[in-house]
Image (cartoon, rainbow, N blue to C red):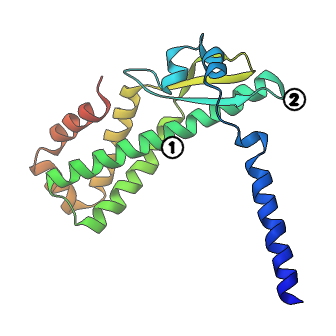
Amino acid sequence: MKHQCLAWILALALCGILAAGCSPAAKKIDNEALEEEFKNAPEWVLTGHLKETTSAVGSAKIGKGGLQFARTEALATGRDELARQVSVKVETLVNNFAQQTGIGDDQMLDAFSKQVSRQITDETLAGSRQQDIWISPSADVYVLVVMDNEQIKTAVRRQMVSSYRQDDARWQEFKAKNGAEELDRELERAFGR
């Protein structure tokens, strides 16, 4: 009896899996429809960013909440992506810089990097703004969100110098190794002009 019941459960589960595979969601992507949908889209919609800037694209479907609700949702999605980008750049910059100047061991460096990255991301996202918007033929809103690289560089420099000053030994080593000049070079590499 138990084996028969188990066999029925397995058969029903297999039928469910097969039915899910045949559902509309499992359809192949229609390349012609995609080409038609995005034929008039700005380049930034397709690439997910604008060249030479710190930028990201967010999108949302226009629903019952209307255009403004969808725009706000798309803006939030774009800012989330910006936060990830800035966080990765800042952590890389801090790690490279701290290793070049010889400050801290790995564990201390990692904590320092994460702390500065979190502070910078929170601070700079407040300066992000919508630069452009595009609405697709199928009522999806795409928002281009940008941040000023100079603002990011200023915030990174301020946070890093402030963090170094909190530890007298690190601050002395930072000053002795011309840390400020090296930091400026790393900022230019990471965020350019």
Q: Is 134 placed above or below 174 here?
A: above
Per the image, label 1 sits on a secondary structure element best described as helix
Q: Residue 122: give x, y in percent of width and height.
A: 51, 43
Q: Amino acid at mark 2?
A: Lys
Q: Amino acid at mark 1?
A: Asp
Q: Nearer the viewer, mark 1 or mark 2?
A: 2
Q: Residue at x 29, y 44 (%)?
A: 93
Q: Quick check: 52 left or right of 101? A: right
Mark 1 burial class by Cα count in 10 Å: few <14, some 14-19, many 20+: few
Q: Residue 79: give x, y in percent of width and height.
A: 56, 35
Q: Residue at x 10, y 49 (%)?
A: 177
The residue labelled by disc 2 is: 64
Q: Residue 133: give x, y in percent of width and height.
A: 62, 17
Q: Closer to the camera, 176 or 34?
A: 34
Q: Residue 166: give x, y in percent of width and height.
A: 31, 58
Q: Quadrant of the C terminus?
A: top left
Q: Is 21 placed above or below 126 here?
A: below
Per the image, label 2 sits on a secondary structure element best described as loop
Res 157 → quadrant? top left
Pointers 1 and 2 in contact (C-beta within 8 Å): no
Q: Closer to the camera, 132 or 39?
A: 39
Looking at the image, is mark 1 or mark 2 earlier in the sequence? 2
The residue labelled by disc 1 is: 122
